[in-house]
Amino acid sequence: MAETKLLRECAKYLSSEGIYYTKNPTGLLACINGQFVLFKFEEVTLPRKLTASGGLSYRPRSLREFIGKVRAIQSETEGRK
């Protein structure tokens, strides 16, 4: 159940940063500066529609890795504006 704990910690971080997200049993779908990003916490097949429409998908192994990826996406999308 480590994945469940990590999912809760990551959702808490997104809330603290004011980032919109939805949660399901295996992951989080967040909108980071207009970029849809799926964070999966279990081994599952990725939705083709998400990646086909330019969305991103990651499988973080720790809260530190998750926060680093969120900040990297924020930096990348800020540069496009």
Image (cartoon, grey):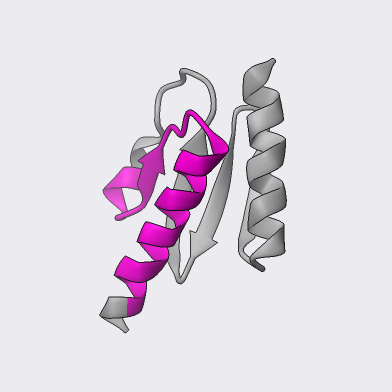
Q: State how many labels appear.
A: 0
Q: Residue at x 27, y 78 (%)?
A: 80
Q: Position of residue 54 (x, y in %)?
A: 30, 55
Q: Quadrant of the C terminus?
A: bottom left
Instruction: Tell me if residue 14 comes above or below residue 3 in the rendering.
Output: below
Within the image, what quadrant is residue 49 found in? top left
Look at the image and say whether residue 50 sits in the magenta stretch. no
Q: Note whether 9 is above or below 73 in the view shown.
A: above
Using residue 20 as the reference point, say whether residue 75 is left or right of it. left
Q: Quadrant of residue 17?
A: bottom right
Looking at the image, the residue that sits furthest to the bottom is 81
- Within the magenta stretch, is there residue 52? yes
Query: Relative to 11, is 61 on the left or the right?
Result: left
> In the visual, does 79 lie left or right of 16?
left
The quarter of the rendered structure image containing the N terminus is top right
The main secondary structure of the magenta stretch is helix
Above or below, 33 relative to 14: below
Residue 78 horizontal/vertical position (percent): 36, 77
Which residue corresponds to the image point at 40% horizontal and 31% vertical from the top-left?
Answer: 46
Percent of width and height locating residue 70 = 46, 55
* Residue bounds of the magenta highlight: 51-78
* Whole-percent x, y for residue 56 in the image: 35, 48
Question: Residue at left 56%, top 39%?
Answer: 63
Quarter holding residue 27: top right
